[in-house]
Amino acid sequence: MSLELWSTVASVGTFVVIAATAIAAVIQLRHMRASNQITILNDLRKATEDEQFREAIEFIYTLPSRVQSSEFRAKLQGVRLPRDVYPIGLVGRLYETLGSYVNRGMLDADLVCDLWAPVVFGHWEDMADAIVVMRRTRGPELFENFEYLACISKRYLDRSVSVYPKGLPRIAPEDKWAAEDLCGRVTPTQ
């Protein structure tokens, strides 16, 4: 074998090793990203299961009626939130963080919407009027990543696409009590 042939074989061998290394690196990066996403989502899940957060959510459900009061709106415009409206900051910061992770590409938007869209959008609707009032003194940037997350959550919900795998049969039982429970339901107009 000539030196040129050996050189060519060595070059091809080097190329194969470099290509295999690059492929392994890409695979490892994908696994690391998935691992990071799992860690972040687990931490957020734990935060939402905290008793203080759950109490804050109960407060958030009352915001649409509370914000009707001019005295309550005045509290929201102060430099600091008074202790009795602290739950707004607690819940808002969690969703602001989650929205920032999605906005910066640290978390996959479709994954987050699959897991959280109804909750995020529902809490945004409960909090939106209060946030708008708070922005009078804090600027439009306040909770903008939360707003972004609510916007993409709404788009996700509007698509109303099932994530259940196509072709896989459903195994949930029939709702035996649907008719009975609908008959006894009180509508808001009654």
Image (cartoon, helix red, strand yellow):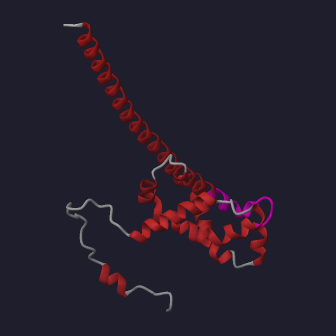
Say which quarter of the image contains residue 177: bottom left
- Image height check: is 13 above or below 171? above
Q: Is residue 89 magenta?
A: yes
Say which quarter of the image contains residue 186: bottom left
Q: Position of residue 33 (x, y in %)?
A: 44, 40
Residue drawn at the location 41% of the way across and 85% of the way down: 185
- Quarter placement of the N terminus: top left
Q: Nearer the viewer, residue 157 or 77?
A: 157
In screen coordinates, is 126 left or right of 18? right
Q: Position of residue 95 (x, y in %)?
A: 57, 57
In screen coordinates, is 39 left or right of 165? right
- Image height check: is 76 above or below 26? below
Magenta span? 77-92
Q: Position of residue 117 (x, y in %)?
A: 47, 63
Q: Nearer the viewer, residue 32 or 125?
A: 32
In screen coordinates, is 132 left or right of 167? right
Q: Nearer the viewer, residue 69 or 158?
A: 158
Q: Position of residue 112 (x, y in %)?
A: 46, 55
Residue drawn at the location 33% of the way across and 61% of the way down: 163
Say which quarter of the image contains residue 59: bottom right
Q: Which residue of the protein is positioned furthest toward the bottom in this rendering?
A: 190
- Image height check: is 101 above or below 131? above
Q: Nearer the viewer, residue 65 or 101?
A: 101
Query: What kind of secondary structure does the magenta stretch mostly adopt?
Result: helix
Residue drawn at the location 24% of the way across and 68% of the way down: 173
Residue drawn at the location 62% of the way across and 70% of the way down: 128
Q: Is residue 49 magenta?
A: no
